[in-house]
Amino acid sequence: MTDGFGRLLIARFVGFRLLPGQIVALAALGLIFFGACLLMLPIATHPGVNISFLDALFTATSAVCVTGLIVVDTPQDFTLFGQGVVLGLIQIGGLGYALMATMILLILGRRLGLRDRMMLSESMNTMDLQGLVRFVKLVATITFGLEGLGAVLLTLRFAVDMPWGTAAYYGIFHSISAFNNAGFALFSDSFKSFQTDWSINGIITILVIFGSIGFFVFEDLLGNLRGQRFRLQTHTKLVLVTTALLIVGGTIGITILEWNNPSTFQSASIGKKLTISYFHSVSRTAGFTSIDIVDMRDATLYFLLLLMAIGGSPGSMAGGLKTTTAAIVFLTILNMLRRDRDVEVFNRRIPQDLITRALCFTVLAIVMITGMTLLLDSTESQPFLFLMFEITSAMGIVGMSLGNGETLSLSALFTDFGKVMIMLSMLLGRFGPLMIGLFAVKTAVSKPYRYAKARVIIG
């Protein structure tokens, strides 16, 4: 039993005076430390490979936060045991520490009290406590079901090029990594060897998309299929439409920006260009690559940076600002230009408090990315755009990187301070929205009076 699980399970019976959100964060930190200790064991690395504790801690943080930035070559430096540790951290980190502990309690036949449900709901980015246990079971079923299906399909494909045993292992590893939007791969060049392989591209990207749209969407879709509901919720519509627009827009944008770039795919066929562009557009939440993105034009890199910053959807494996947040901000700007009174979408009005929160999250994300990049620029000798790309990838828990010139992330070239900054960015990207959201909810106080409106000139 890991330290992370231990904290959650002990909290169930002893009742530490910690807020549920704090328990979730402590569980993650405990899991990261425990994972780093496992990766330091001699059986975790091949003979002759020595990694520092900081690199082990970096790897564990990247796995638990399902980011995918690496400073150690996963297939070349780690043994089967070490790779298994990384895979376990990805699964626990992606599925949720509180969710995993809750599943254990349910298996043991324990009843969940209000405190446990609050901890679980905060871990899954929802304050709705009704039907939470049923929702947990649905999440587990969807996760293991899709990961299992993906593993089978990938195994069948990999078996064409490798023995069945190896193919099965590769299939399981990459299915879990893809669905959890982790970006870890057992190929040192990620998926560059499968640029035009539609079976690999298709399976991986579908798993990434399913893992990034959120379980609330799955619940709504299944409810409609079963006849329990007769229309999709506004949240589901907004997620699906925004996700589709980002994928299509990202594919078109990358294709246009890189069309005549001789370093990427100028000489490639139209089909190959679209395939590569589609793969990276989807991978904005996962971090897999099929070309050396360092060869992309600066304009393309900045475009990818924006896609990474938006990220996936609420309640999903992916991070980032979230698709719904970006959509609400865009609709608010559009509403202001049109001079409409209310922000509306799908014949529904967006509440003012949601608009305020979306704008606040956006501003905070910009401030944090800019601030962390400026700090990193003070110690690292890389181009500013490269540093901002790495910070955005870390804070958006994406894992896409411009690389160290070989098979590792750019972070491998950083000083110890730089690596710590990247780890902090990953933790902020994973738990920052949760903590900020809880702070906003718990500190909201209604005053018995209101001041007169003030007229301030802006713009």
Image (cartoon, helix red, strand yellow):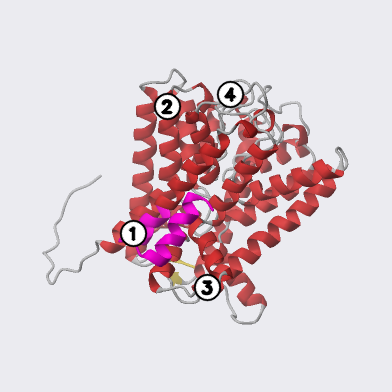
Lateral position of residue 416 relative to residue 357, left or right: right
Q: CA distance from mark 1 to mark 3?
A: 21 Å
Task: Tell me whether circle 3 and circle 2 mark residues in contact (CB < 8 Å).
Answer: no
Q: Nearer the viewer, mark 1 or mark 3?
A: 3
Q: Amino acid at mark 4?
A: Asn
* Residue occupied by mark 4: 50
Figure disc tally: 4
Q: CA distance from mark 4 to mark 3?
A: 44 Å
From the viewer's perspective, is 270 left or right of 417?
A: right
Magenta stretch contains residue 57: no
Disc nearer the start of the sequence (4/1): 4
Q: CA distance from mark 4 to mark 1?
A: 41 Å
**Residue 133: image tag:** 3
Q: Position of residue 219 (x, y in %)?
A: 58, 70
Q: Secondary structure at mark 2?
A: helix
Quadrant of the image for the C terminus? top left
Q: Is residue 435 above or below residue 391?
A: below
Callout 1 crowding tier (Cα within 10 Å): few <14, some 14–19, many ≥20: some
Crowdedness near tag 2: few (<14), some (14–19) or many (≥20) residues, C-alpha within 10 Å = many
Under mark 3, the amino acid is Val
Q: Nearer the viewer, mark 4 or mark 3?
A: 4
Residue under label 2, please give it: 418
User: Magenta region, mostly helix, strand or loop?
Assistant: helix
User: Which label number is shown at residue 395?
Assistant: none
Q: Position of residue 369 (x, y in %)?
A: 39, 37
User: Tag on residue 438?
Assistant: 1
- Looking at the image, do the residues carrying marks 2 and 1 touch, with CB atoms under 8 Å apart? no
The mark nearer the N terminus, 4 or 2, is 4
